[in-house]
Image: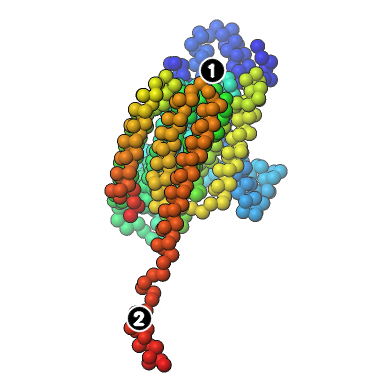
Amino acid sequence: MTPWYQDPVQFIAEWLRGVLLGWGMPPDGVELVLTVLGAGTLALLAMLWVVFLIWYERKLIGRIQDRFGPNRVGPWGIFQPIADMLKIFTKEYITPEGVDRVPYNLAPVLAVASVLLIWAVIPFTMTVMGVNLNVGLVYIIASGGLGVLGIILAGWSSNNKYALLGGFRAVAQLVSYEVPMVVSLLIPVILAGSLGVNDIVMAQRIPYLISAPVAALIFFITSMAETGRSPFDLTEAESEIVAGFNIEYSGLKFGMFYVAEFLHAFTVSLLFATLFLGGWRGPLAEQIPLLGFVYLVVKTFVVYFIVILFRGSLPRFRIDQMMDLNWKLLTPLALVSLIVSALVAKPLEGMPVAQTLALLVSNGIVLILFIEGTGKKVQRRREIVGKPRPLAVPHPEEQQGAQSTGG
Amino acid sequence: MLSEWLYVGVFFLIAMFLPAAAIFIAGILAPKKPNPIKNSTYECGIETVGPSWIQFKAQYYVYTLVFLVFDVEVVLLFPWAVAYHQLPLFAVVEGVIFILILLGGLLYAWRKGALEWL
């Protein structure tokens, strides 16, 4: 039995199970109570965590833009999101005429739920996780699909043209970026031989960032697009379609979309850390589970920092550029890297170091070839665009005539 | 196995309940003063002309169609990926040929101009 401070969650669960069994509850009932308590605690903590995330992100974005960020309420402005929360709780709901009531009210709930659902399968330490589903990754992708549903419901039911346009864009974007994301997720599955998220973490003696760098890159870009934030925030481009799909929402219903967005950005960082950086793995993490949690948090915050840095520094894509990036670069790249990884990894099975090195080299070659190819294409397009335009040049005869009369 | 899905079911209910409860509580706390001007549809200060549920660009439809092909493909590839360690090289190559056919499909859609945003 490990001491309580090494694995507190498991300790509390065991203690509670003992107490409930001692009261004479049937074992099935005890399991149900523990399930409900565990799921409720996890979901509630995830929701409350957003309060911190909002502060962290605003502070960081402020620093990137050479501002202070929130700095009035409490030390370093840390109570600012709590004040915002109190304010938004007392804001009026303005429901415009002609909305489709059921989808209109369901959409913000679905948007948050789709992100929260992912937390159910993430292993936080070796022993503490919601549940180690044997189809974990498929479940994560399915939850992501639910988020698209929330957005299209919001856009469609608002009875507003801007909302509808934003909804269309959102669906085109989210649905398209799901393709390379899912294909790139196949590579960790191939290497680990399982869809269970904890099994993938267990299999990462060497983090998959090293053996599958292309997949990691594609997953990072596509999951940033899935969150719908800058530079992929076409769905809510203020200058074009005002606020996009959430234009007719107000009060906390509007706030829920923002909760979903902030939580989604953190959740994809968590997923990236879990799938490609080894999750809770690290020195001594198997003996002391609590240490694994610390490793996971550190890795997640490194990724989350990069996500925020992207948001703070890149301008918005145009929609055709965004679609080209997805269908003409990321999708072929994902498919080719999947083929290469599958072929390279097979003959070298049983030799983990040689396999990792071979995968790293082959991934590098694929990436360089793709960058070379697209670089040439971009160069050619620049040459075409850069040529002088014929309309601006006066006709040669007129030019001569002008010269003769003038001279 | 069953208890795992029980957990997912319970988690789904809680994940739906939490935001719904928050929205409900805010609805009780918040003032309610609707009036016709406030409740009208927003559109740059003028009134909306015509129905809001407008026709949409056919391009969205084409993209969704291409997406559907790849989504179904991936569903077929997941079992192949899970069984990868048990498969002989021959079966791996078969899977690769399957992906190559789909890559050909992507190139076809590309040449046909289905991936151009007009």
Decide which of A46, A340 is in the foreground and name it: A340
With respect to residue B60, does A115 lie above or below? above
Which quadrant of the view contains residue A57? top right
Residue A19 disc label: none
The residue indicated by pointer 1 is A34
Q: Quadrant of the N terminus of chain A?
A: top right
Q: Residue at x 40, y 21 (%)?
A: B87
Query: Which residue corresponds to the image point at 67% horizontal and 45% vertical from the top-left?
Result: A77
In-front residue for pair B110/A75: B110
Residue B4 in picture, x, y percent from top left = 46, 19
The image position of residue A8, as x and y in percent, is 64, 20
Q: Is A239 rendered above or below residue A249?
A: below
Of labels 1 and 2, earlier in sequence is 1
- Disc 2 target residue: A396
Q: Nearer the viewer, mark 1 or mark 2?
A: 2
Q: Amino acid at mark 2?
A: Pro
Name the residue type under label 1. Leu
A364 relative position to B65: left or right: right
Can residue B39 be seen in the rendering of this structure?
no
Closer to the camera, A316 or B105? B105
Expressed as whole percent of the image width and height from the top left, the position of residue A56 reads 62, 42
Chain holding disc 1: A
Which quadrant of the structure image shows residue A292?
top right
Q: Is residue A7 above or below residue A370?
A: above
Confirm or deny contact between disc 1 and disc 2 (CB under 8 A): no
Crowd tier of the residue under label 1, counting other residues whose Cα lies within 10 Å: few below 14, some 14–19, many 20 or above:
some
Residue A58 % position (x, y) = 60, 47
